Image: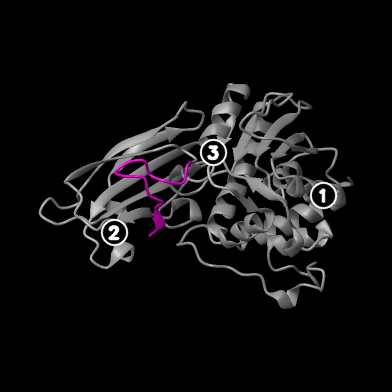
Amino acid sequence: MIDSQRELHRETIMGLVEMLPIDGEQQAVELDARRLGPDGIALGFPPRNIIEYLSWHMGQSWEDLDGDTPMKTRGSFSARESVVACIADEVRTRRFVDAMVGAVAAKERDTRTGQSIEVCDAGTGAFALLAIIAALESPRVHVTAVDINGSSVETARTLVENMGLSRQIDIIEADATTFEPEDKPDILVSETMNRALLDEPIVQVLKNLVPQSDREAIVLPGEVRLHSALYDGPHGLDDVPDPASWPEVYAYRAGDDTDMISFETRRLDRQMNSTGLGVYARVKVGETWLEVRQSALTQIVGIQSMRNFGEVETVRYIPGDYAFLEPWRVIPAVV
């Protein structure tokens, strides 16, 4: 890939990234169909978002992405749903991209000139955005990008080849919870996660890959802190007091051998009734934290009871599962 082409890709993508909000609450974002041709490829430049730019080089409609990604506990989700989630979660995208740029810069300073910088992107998705960002940041970067969805893998390979990055990025179809990289990653990134460490297997992915990484590897995300409270919710899950005041109840560090999440949650006010139970995660990405409601990852999840909870309740669930085991087995809703 010639330097001018690399620089064009980098300047365009980073320019679009800098347009994304760096904080604030998550907002719903939709593609404007008028900007897409009949096959879904973006029309005209400059593109208005990263998906339009990558769609142009992908040569395939994002609406035509198919294939299912099997979930550990409840069926599957489609490659199309993954794309929509990426578009909608702007603060999350900005934080992960900024953290990847910083991680590559740090490893360039720390490694010998000419030595490759190994990056593993576990759950790279159809657009392989973080793999592409890493490769564009330095010609020394080599990325092993893994995804379990065969359709996403095929699409990502086409995109990477069309962008002239196939020498730097290997796209592999594999299960990241059991994958064994050939080289120890200097940077490990995975976005295989959802709210409160539910639904997706980030814990299992990092449990597998962190021990296989370099001892000084940068891991994104690095930490997750859970906050929880019992509250009076006469109007259901919409009636939630200021979550910033909720106490921290559980701390997870990337690579922890965590088979069960268990903690006690308490009433915010001992004198009140408590019919609502809420949990949310704060996620450390690089040197910054995604705070409550800034991302799909940090939305509050909870359950509404037909009876009053006690003053203290024990909450237990399996990371990556989709339901609480205690107080009783129930699928939590987004608050």
Q: Which mark is residue 6?
A: 1
Task: Write down the quadrant of residue 100 in the picture.
Answer: top right
Q: Are marks 2 and 1 in contact (CB under 8 Å)?
A: no
**Residue segment shown in magenta:** 321-335
* Dominant SS type (magenta): loop
Nearer the observer, 235 or 156: 235
> Reading the chain from its start, which is encountered first: label 2 or label 3?
3
Task: Write down the quadrant of residue 19 in the picture.
Answer: bottom right
Residue 269: x %, y % from top left: 15, 53
| Measured Cα–Cα span from mark 2 to mark 3 | 27 Å
On the picture, is 111 further left or further right than 59?
left
Is residue 214 at least partly visible in the picture? no
Task: Write down the quadrant of residue 35 in the picture.
Answer: bottom right
Circle 2 is placed at which residue position? 242
Q: Nearer the viewer, mark 2 or mark 1?
A: 2
Q: Amino acid at mark 2?
A: Asp
Q: Residue furthest bottom?
A: 34
Circle 3 is placed at which residue position? 202
Q: Mark 1: few, some, or many residues within 10 Å (few <14, many ≥20)? A: some
Relative vertical location of residue 50 with respect to residue 104 in this rendering, above or below: below
Q: Mark 3: few, some, or many residues within 10 Å (few <14, many ≥20)? A: many
Is residue 118 at least partly visible in the picture? yes
Q: Amino acid at mark 3?
A: Ile
